[in-house]
Amino acid sequence: ETFIFEGKTKEEAIEKACKELNLPKEELEIEVLEHGSSGIFGIVGGKKSKIKVRIKKKEEEETAEDVVSIAKNALENIFDLLQLKDMNITAEDSEKGTLIKIEGGKDAGLLIGKGGKTLDALEFLIKRIVNKKLKRNVQIELDVQGYRERRKEYLRKLAISLAEKAKKIGKPVTTEPLNARDRKVIHVTLKDDNSLETKSQGEGSLRKIVIIPKTKGKDVR
């Protein structure tokens, strides 16, 4: 949004802008449209100075816009290479940083893959591209047609089901290998159940979670 201010001099116009917008000069982008003149003998035909003013964006706002722009451009190039059509890309702020949403297109499911593995790989690639261009670490979460929330709901139900099984048979129950994002959902879902303990097992990016029932203050191993 831009604003126009006038004054007998450029300095007066700037002073008016600062007063009207309640901002210091340093936070304004100022462009002189017309230089003032005092006219004949400083009396007749005087011309006012006119300036165009825009409020400077904060660094984090510029970064957010850059993140979205770079991510969108990278995704569109990938879609072109894969010949994926009618893909709609939107962005919004999230707890983790910037959430990039992909909707539409009959082939959108191809971007998810089994267990979200393709989506995770695509998210990793987009992060690398954005971070390299901005030369800083930016948090990005990629989602396709609401898959992330559906996956969370599935994992919550799985955690509750396995927890009930572990308590019923009195023995530890183990999940399939999961990535860090999925493991967190399991841990968080069961963290308030004092009759259970959850532990990650294995090495590397994919690890299992062991759900351990407790009896009489002791772990059942």
Image (cartoon, rainbow, N blue to C red):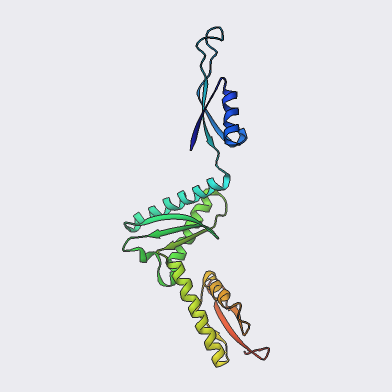
Q: Is residue 150 left or right of residue 164?
A: left
The residue shown at (41%, 72%) is: 114
* The quarter of the displayed image where residue 30 is located: top right
- Look at the picture and state if 133 lies above or below 170: above
Relative vertical location of residue 193 with respect to residue 36 in this rendering, above or below: below
Task: Farthest residue to the top: give it.
Answer: 41
Q: Nearer the viewer, residue 106 or 39?
A: 39
Left or right: residue 1 compared with residue 21: left
The structure residue drawn at horizontal position 36% and vertical position 66%, both measured from the top left corner, is 109
- Find the residue positioned furthest to the right: 217
Image x and y of residue 8, in percent: 56, 19
Of residues 71 and 6, the one drawn nearer to the viewer in this rendering = 6
What is the x, y in percent for residue 172? 57, 87
Compared with 120, 201 (above or below) is below
Q: Is residue 23 above or below residue 190?
A: above
Place of residue 13 in the rendered image (x, y in percent of width and height, measured from the top left): 56, 25
Name the residue: 56% across, 79% down: 209
- The quadrant in which residue 201 appears is bottom right
Query: Which residue occupies the foreground of this view, 69 or 91?
Result: 91
- Residue at the image point whose x is 55% and y is 13% from the top: 38
Q: Quadrant of the C terminus?
A: bottom right
Q: How many marks?
A: 0
Tell me residue 216's x, y (percent). 67, 91
